[in-house]
């Protein structure tokens, strides 16, 4: 989108009022600065909107990367919770004879089930839809590889045009100041100036229309980019929530993993005359039988607590950290609100973006070519010759 450095001379010609019997009077000297300044402002607006498009493309890329990251984290957490629940189903029957241990395991298992079914799984389903079932990756690739470079060229050209027009306007004002040197003795090519005056209004209108249409297109692109971003801007809040859950989930899952090793550990239950060694797993299995045996020993009080104590002392290694980790998990994870069909509709708004931008550029270029064709008439002071 290039405007010749002679644009000001053309627009100047479109406002000429010439009287061959008097000193030359050019109304454009008073009328031209405002429309030219508006044209400069329009180029600056095109550049500004273009820069905003680039910033929004970068922001969208950040949001997409955020979705991919949280989707990966949710996928892993869902797998960890599923695996933990499978382990709980095996371990809970083993530890059930000791109620304090059973209660911790049941609570942790229920918490994991609730977190997974009501929070992690539905949230992962949503991030998976965005990451793998929507058109966001293809759109992001198109924006980065095609649209962003295209917009950058427009920004550079618009900024260049605004700078050149600013300089031309300054020169035009200086030229207006020199009009006092022209008088009735000058020969004026009336036909050329009349042709210029008759065509200038439409050419300026086409130029203005091309600029306005392109700014409107840019604003639409920015609006659509913001719509797509807003649909997935939940990624950061979900990521923060997932990051909070990671530590307690890992704590419980890790301690579940320790349990199998503990079950093979040897413990001794010594109460009065009862003194026997067991693996922890055997102790759980035989705890009720041990309690019945110890109760037959005279003078022993709080038998169940005494029998359970060496068992729970070993199990505290896993139950205590699990108890601490359960509370933050009970808050759960709130799945984000999302509609895949609505999201794909938003993405679909970019289907013709490259063609639309090209069409806008082509229309503007044609207007500039028409403008360039008129510039020859405005050369050499419009052909005005003075004796």
Image (cartoon, rainbow, N blue to C red):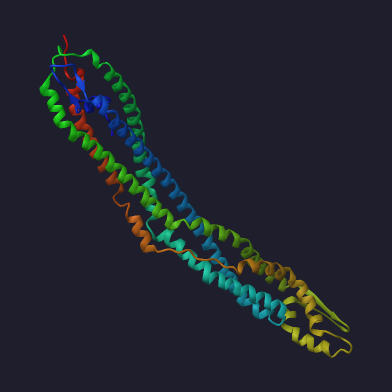
Which quadrant of the view contains residue 50?
A: top left
Instruction: Please say if 387 is above or below 363.
Output: above
Question: Relative to residue 57, is residue 90 depicted above or below?
Answer: below
**Position of 295 compared to 360: left or right?**
right
Give the position of the N terminus as an image quadrant. top left
Front residue (pair 342, 309): 342
Residue 22, x across and y down, in percent: 16, 16
The picture quadrant where one finds residue 317 is bottom right
Regarding residue 107, the answer to whether it shows in the image is yes
Across and down, in percent, residue 211 comes to: 28, 39
The residue drawn where x is 79% and y is 77% is 309
Locate residue 19 relative to residue 160 in the image: left or right.
left
Residue positioned most to the front:
22
Identify which residue, 83 or 357, lies in the foreground. Answer: 357
Q: In which quarter of the image is the C terminus?
A: top left
Residue located at (29% from left, 42% from top) = 214
Q: Residue at x 33, y 49 (%)?
A: 220
Quick check: 203 left or right of 305? left
Please determine whether, in this image, residue 246 is positioned above or below residue 360.
below
**At which x and y percent is residue 197?**
16, 28
Q: Can residue 362 be seen in this view?
A: no
What count of labels does the image hold? 0
In the rendering, at what x and y percent does residue 55 appear?
Answer: 43, 44
Q: Nearer the viewer, residue 197 or 314?
A: 197
Residue extending furthest toward the top: 387
């Amino acid at each position: 989108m290039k405007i010749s450095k002679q644009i000001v001379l053309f627009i100047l010609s479109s406002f000429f009022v010439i009287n061959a019997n008097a000193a030359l009077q050019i109304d454009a000297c008073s009328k031209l600065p405002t429309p030219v300044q508006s044209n400069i402002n329009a180029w600056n607006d095109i550049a500004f909107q273009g820069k905003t498009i680039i910033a929004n493309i970068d922001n969208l890329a950040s949001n997409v990367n955020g979705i991919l990251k949280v989707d990966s984290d949710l996928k892993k957490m869902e797998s960890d919770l599923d695996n933990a629940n499978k382990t709980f189903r095996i371990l809970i029957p083993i530890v059930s004879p000791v109620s304090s241990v059973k209660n911790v395991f049941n609570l942790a298992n229920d918490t994991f089930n609730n977190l997974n079914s009501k929070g992690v799984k539905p949230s992962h389903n949503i991030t998976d839809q965005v990451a793998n079932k929507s058109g966001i990756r293809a759109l992001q690739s198109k924006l980065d590889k095609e649209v962003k470079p295209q917009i950058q060229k427009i920004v550079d050209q618009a900024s260049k045009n605004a700078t050149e027009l600013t300089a031309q306007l300054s020169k035009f004002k200086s030229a207006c100041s020199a009009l006092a040197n022209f008088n009735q003795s000058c020969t004026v090519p009336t036909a050329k100036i009349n042709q210029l005056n008759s065509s200038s209004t439409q050419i300026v209108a086409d130029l203005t229309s091309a600029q306005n249409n392109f700014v409107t297109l840019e604003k639409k692109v920015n609006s659509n980019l913001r719509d797509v971003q807003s649909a997935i801007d939940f990624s950061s809040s979900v990521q923060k929530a997932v990051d909070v859950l990671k530590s307690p989930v890992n704590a419980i899952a890790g301690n579940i993993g320790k349990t199998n090793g503990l079950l093979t550990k040897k413990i001794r239950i010594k109460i009065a005359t009862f003194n026997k060694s067991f693996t922890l797993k055997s102790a759980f299995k035989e705890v009720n039988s041990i309690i019945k045996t110890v109760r037959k020993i005279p003078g022993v009080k709080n038998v169940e607590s005494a029998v359970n104590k060496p068992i729970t002392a070993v199990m505290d290694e896993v139950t205590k950290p699990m108890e601490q980790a359960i509370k933050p998990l009970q808050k759960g994870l709130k799945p984000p609100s999302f509609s895949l069909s609505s999201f794909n509709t938003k993405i679909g708004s970019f289907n013709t973006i490259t063609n639309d931008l090209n069409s806008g550029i082509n229309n503007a270029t044609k207007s500039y070519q028409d403008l360039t064709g008129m510039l020859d008439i405005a050369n050499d002071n419009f052909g005005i010759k003075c004796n």
